[in-house]
């Protein structure tokens, strides 16, 4: 792992036999507690032992190795929704104002079906994207793809990737084929459905049962566009035309009892709402649906850059936070976003939701993602017991900052910091 440690050893405090290392920085952002000015993180054996003010931690761990860092220490970021296999598809055009979400899907499918991108170029683009994520401060990624990726050993990056094989099928015939494929999958492959509009209830419930048995995340695109809700409620709109032209229309929509209801209510009818469900996008959800998601402990991932690119609207983040849902953040793929940069996603979120506290946005990009991926006991905060992987960022814009609120405001609204380094204690 490339982990340039921005430190200088403080010889007077160093005892070679000490099992502890203290990382000191002008600012520590634990996420699980308020920002600490002149803070420190004590680590040993690859785990965080304590976080606090520099003076208290140095008193507690007298004799430990002391390493001074510039700028800010914080947990690694989490990108909870990306499609690495689409990393070579950066030339899918923005939908124009008179085009629909379905037009964008048509453009992407046309490019994929035309071929023209060699498998090795696709794999190279995916590896480059993974490296870019690491360099930008992303520690965990939830990657969704239709093709099983290269074994992780071939990927030269230390980002920790969880991969979900995405399956879909809108007709009875497709369902038969997909169920046969599911039955033949190795238990080492985690699989998940694409979206309610593209995947039959039979495929979704089969994948949910399998995800519960194998104890992995069940993630799907939910309520991304108004067109999706129109299809579920009325069986009409651009998705119907899209499915008809591809031979995928069998009148399964509207589902009985869907009058006036949304995509989350549809999933609830299918018995899919629980703490293992990760709903990605949730742009077009009602307050009742937000309450249902919160009550069932479901996870949500917002992709504000992708939503802006596709012009599908803005998710009701204020409502989610008011109902004690802390969404994760995702970039989605380069086919539906200008850049895949979590710092930019935070910036867009701040622009779209000026009333949301910067601390909440920072928590989404770290703890929210770790919770969505079910690994908040290991990652997502700088707190005792978590892995000793620290992100160290610095930027000239942080020089004038003089309190924690200003620091979080600058970190979440200023885009990617100039200096991003990893500190990894094995
Ligand atoms: Zn996606």
Image (cartoon, rainbow, N blue to C red):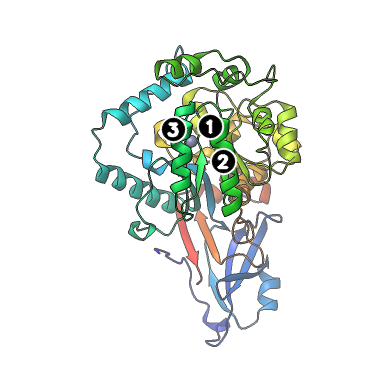
Name the foreground residue: 219 vs 337.
219
Instruction: Say the numbered circle drawn on residue 106.
Output: none
Q: Is residue 390 above or below residue 232?
A: below
Residue at disc 3, CB closer than 8 Å to ligand 1: no
Residue at point 32% right, 25% down? 110
Is residue 5 in view from this perspective?
Answer: yes
Q: Position of residue 200 (x, y in %)?
A: 54, 30
Name the foreground residue: 343 vs 118.
118
> Count of labels shown?
3
Residue at point 39% right, 50% down? 130
Q: Earlier in the sequence, mark 2 or mark 3?
A: 2
Q: Position of residue 324 (x, y in %)?
A: 74, 41
Residue at point 76% right, 40% down? 295
Q: Earlier in the sequence, mark 3 or mark 1?
A: 1
SS of the residue at dot 1? Answer: loop
Q: Is residue 208 above or below residue 419?
A: above
Q: Is residue 320 above or below residue 142?
A: above
Q: Earlier in the sequence, mark 2 or mark 1?
A: 1
Instruction: Say the numbered circle drawn on residue 206.
Output: 2
Instruction: Say the numbered circle drawn on residue 337.
Output: 3
Q: Is residue 255 left or right of residue 241?
A: right
Residue density around tag 1, few if under 14, some if 14–19, many if 20 or more, within 10 Å: many
Is residue 302 in view from this perspective?
Answer: no
Q: Is residue 4 left or right of residue 81?
A: left
């Amino acid at each position: 792992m490339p982990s340039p440690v921005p430190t200088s050893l403080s010889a007077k405090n160093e005892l070679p036999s000490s099992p502890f290392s203290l990382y000191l920085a002008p600012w520590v952002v634990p996420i699980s507690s308020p920002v600490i000015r002149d803070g420190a993180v004590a680590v040993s054996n690859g785990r965080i032992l304590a976080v606090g003010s520099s003076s208290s931690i140095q008193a507690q761990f007298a004799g430990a190795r002391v390493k001074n860092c510039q700028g800010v220490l914080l947990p690694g970021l989490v990108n909870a929704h990306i499609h690495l296999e689409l990393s070579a598809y950066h030339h899918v055009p923005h939908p124009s104002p008179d085009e629909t979400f379905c037009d964008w899907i048509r453009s992407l499918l046309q490019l994929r079906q035309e071929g023209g991108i060699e498998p090795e170029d696709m794999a190279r683009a995916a590896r480059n994207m993974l490296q870019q994520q690491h360099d930008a401060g992303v520690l965990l990624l939830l990657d969704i793809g239709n093709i099983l990726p290269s074994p992780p050993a071939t990927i030269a990056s230390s980002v920790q990737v969880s991969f979900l094989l995405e399956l879909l099928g809108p007709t009875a015939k497709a369902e038969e084929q997909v169920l046969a494929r599911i039955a033949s999958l190795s238990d080492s492959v985690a699989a998940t459905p694409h979206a309610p509009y593209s995947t039959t209830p039979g495929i979704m419930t089969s994948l949910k049962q399998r995800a519960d048995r194998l104890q992995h995340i069940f993630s799907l695109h939910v309520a991304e566009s108004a067109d999706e809700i129109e299809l579920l409620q009325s069986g009409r709109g651009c998705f119907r035309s899209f499915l008809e032209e591809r031979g995928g229309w069998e009148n399964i929509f509207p589902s009985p009892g869907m009058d006036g209801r949304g995509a989350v209510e549809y999933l609830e009818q299918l018995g899919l709402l629980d703490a293992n469900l990760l709903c990605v996008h949730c742009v077009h959800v009602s307050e009742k649906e937000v309450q249902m998601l919160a009550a069932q402990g479901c996870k949500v991932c917002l992709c504000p850059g992708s939503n802006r690119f596709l012009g599908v609207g803005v998710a009701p983040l204020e409502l989610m936070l008011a109902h004690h849902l802390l969404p994760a953040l995702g970039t989605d793929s380069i086919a539906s976003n200008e850049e895949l940069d979590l710092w930019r996603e935070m910036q867009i979120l701040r622009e779209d939701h000026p009333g949301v506290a910067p601390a909440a946005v920072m928590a989404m990009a770290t703890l929210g993602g770790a919770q969505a991926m079910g690994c908040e006991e290991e990652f997502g905060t700088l707190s005792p017991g978590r892995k000793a992987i620290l992100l160290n960022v610095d930027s000239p814009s942080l020089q004038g900052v003089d309190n924690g609120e200003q620091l979080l405001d600058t970190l979440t609204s200023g885009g990617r910091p100039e200096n991003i380094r990893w500190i990894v204690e094995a």
